Image (spheres, rainbow, N blue to C red):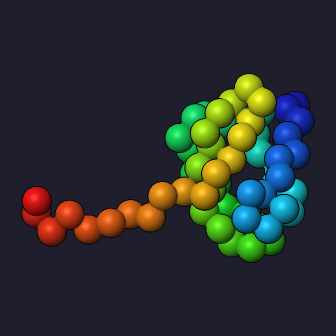
Amino acid sequence: MTTALSVPCPECAGTLEVRPDVLAAEIVVCGQCSSELEVVATGPVVLALAPEVEEDWGE
């Protein structure tokens, strides 16, 4: 059995539970503020707001 890690949300300062085997660049969603967060580091786990997906309009 693996124990989830508690990580603070950079948007609302709430606590997220993430898997210990989470990967860099993975997207997680805060259960309190619904922000999409990107894992920017894994040792220790660091989260940042996920970048907005922009249309490239075929460029």
Q: In which quarter of the image is the N terminus?
A: top right
- The percent position of residue 58, horizontal first and vertical second, equals 10, 63
In the image, taking residue 58 as reference, residue 55 lies left or right, namely right
Q: Is residue 54 left or right of residue 39?
A: left
Is 50 left or right of 9, judged from the image as shown?
left
Q: Position of residue 11 (x, y in %)?
A: 73, 65
- Residue sitting at the far top: 43
Question: Residue 52: percent from the left, percent from the top?
Answer: 44, 64
Q: How many marks are shown on the rendered structure?
A: 0
| Closest to the observer, 4 or 13 | 13
Identify the residue at horizontal 61%, vertical 39% (top origin): 40
Work out whether residue 59 or residue 6 is closer to the camera in this orientation and state it: 59
Residue 32 quadrant: bottom right
Image quadrant in which you'd find residue 4: top right
Residue at (77, 30) in percent of width and height: 44
Residue 50 versus residue 31: which sits nearer the camera? 50
Q: Position of residue 17 (x, y in %)?
A: 83, 50
Q: Can you say whether 44 is above or below 5 in the image?
A: above
From the image, which quarter does the C terminus lie in?
bottom left
Image height check: is 55 above or below 6? below
Q: Is residue 58 above or below residue 5?
A: below
